[in-house]
Image (cartoon, helix red, strand yellow):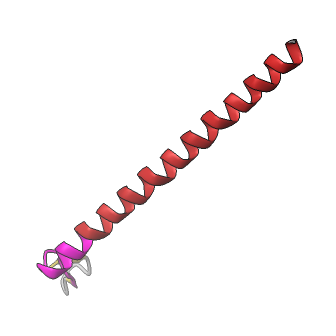
Amino acid sequence: MPPLIAFAGVLGGLAVVRWAYRTAVRINEELEEARRARVAEAVSRNEIPTLRRDPVTGAYRPG
């Protein structure tokens, strides 16, 4: 009987790991999709500043 309990525990552990992995992948895909949508929206509104070089200091500044 103990080997059967151990086997059931291993199967249960694998099921939990598989569920956690799939959940993490799904969440990461949703976050990446949301990030891409924000970037695309900012580009369409021209909210991303262009960097220009200041001739006096040589530093790059939004312009």
Query: Which quadrant of the view contains residue 16?
Result: top right
Residue 41 in magenta stretch: yes
Instruction: Check the picture and name the quadrant holding the N terminus.
Output: top right
User: Residue 60 versus residue 12: which sits nearer the camera?
Assistant: 12
Q: Give the left or right position of residue 26, taking residue 7 as reference.
A: left
Which of the 4 image quadrants contains residue 60?
bottom left
Q: Nearer the viewer, residue 63 or 26?
A: 26
Residue at 38% across, 62% down: 32
* Of residues 39 and 8, the one drawn nearer to the viewer in this rendering: 8
Q: Nearer the viewer, residue 39 or 26?
A: 26
Residue 55 x, y percent position in the rendering: 20, 87
Whether residue 45 is in magenta: the answer is yes
Which image quadrant: the C terminus? bottom left
Q: Residue at x 11, y 78 (%)?
A: 45
Where is residue 14? Give x, y as percent: 69, 36
Could you tell me residue 6's position as x and y percent?
A: 81, 20
> What's the residue at 26%, 81% (across, down)?
58
Q: Residue at x 86, y 12 (%)?
A: 2
Q: Is residue 8 above or below residue 55?
A: above
Q: Residue extending furthest bottom?
A: 55
Q: Relative to residue 2, is residue 23 depicted above or below?
A: below
Which residue lies most toward the top here? Answer: 1
Classify 41 as above or below 19. Answer: below
The magenta stretch is 39-52
Q: Quadrant of residue 8?
A: top right
